[in-house]
Image (spheres, rainbow, N blue to C red):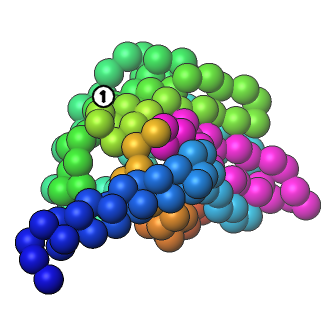
């Protein structure tokens, strides 16, 4: 087989894989929940604060060299922090706060702009805390393939963060 045939087959294979990637989901949602022994208000107050968030930030456990710089008000809409870690850099900002939910806008640069939320609902004398993330992967075929693995990559981090919330609010 000559080089021209190999190059043609390779190009056709790459093209087929690229086209096939567009059949993969464009949107990814990840969610984890845990019940903690704390009032919902305490969880929301902690999550809505740039300093409070650091008390349970799972990425601090995963990267002891994580660099965090606070900005905006200490709590509420606009409160946030920029970060730099072994896995990359970005920024997280509180976008909205209600009695039972804090929504965060993330800017991960070329990796995207997902939205995260921490919801706290009273249940039987405790609080069910749900940490979720939604992300639009756009038209990037590589991101769409990565989307297949996002739950397995991010989910354990959310579980660690929920355990940290339970510890901090105990």
Front position in the image: 44 or 157: 157
What residue is shown at x 65% (from left), y 57% (from top)?
Answer: 31
Is 43 left, or right, of 17 in this rendering?
Answer: right
Can residue 56 be seen in this snapshot? no
Q: Quadrant of the N terminus?
A: bottom left
135 part of magenta stretch: yes
Q: Whole-percent x and y of residue 18?
A: 40, 54
Q: Whole-percent x and y of residue 55?
A: 42, 49
Which is the main secondary structure of the residues drawn in magenta? strand
Q: Mark 1 points at which residue?
A: 70
Q: In which quarter of the image is the C terminus?
A: bottom right
Total numbered labels? 1
Front position in the image: 81 or 134: 134
Which residues lie in the magenta part?
Answer: 114-138
Q: Residues within 10 Å of mark 1 (few under 14, many from 20)?
A: some
Is 135 left, or right, of 31 in this rendering?
Answer: left
Q: In this view, does 107 lie above or below 24?
A: above
What residue is shown at x 60% (from left), y 32% (from top)?
Answer: 103
118 part of magenta stretch: yes
What residue is shown at x 37% (from left), y 16% (from top)?
Answer: 72
Can residue 88 be seen in this snapshot? yes
Helix, strand or loop status at disc 1: strand
Q: Whole-percent x and y of residue 110?
A: 29, 36
């Amino acid at each position: 087989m000559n080089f021209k045939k190999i190059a043609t087959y390779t190009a056709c294979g790459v093209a087929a894989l690229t086209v096939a990637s567009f059949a993969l989901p464009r949107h990814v949602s990840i969610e984890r929940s845990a019940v903690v022994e704390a009032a919902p208000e305490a969880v929301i107050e902690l999550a809505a604060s740039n300093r409070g968030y650091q008390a349970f930030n799972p990425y601090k456990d995963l990267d002891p060299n994580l660099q965090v710089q606070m900005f905006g008000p200490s709590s509420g809409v606009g409160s946030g922090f920029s970060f730099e870690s072994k896995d990359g850099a970005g920024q997280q900002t509180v976008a909205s706060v209600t009695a039972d939910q804090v929504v965060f806008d993330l800017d991960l640069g070329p990796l995207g702009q997902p939205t995260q939320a921490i919801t706290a609902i009273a249940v039987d004398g405790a609080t069910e805390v749900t940490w979720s993330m939604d992300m639009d992967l756009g038209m990037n075929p590589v991101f769409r393939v990565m989307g297949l693995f996002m739950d397995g990559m991010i989910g354990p981090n959310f579980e660690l963060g929920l355990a940290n919330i339970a510890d901090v609010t105990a």
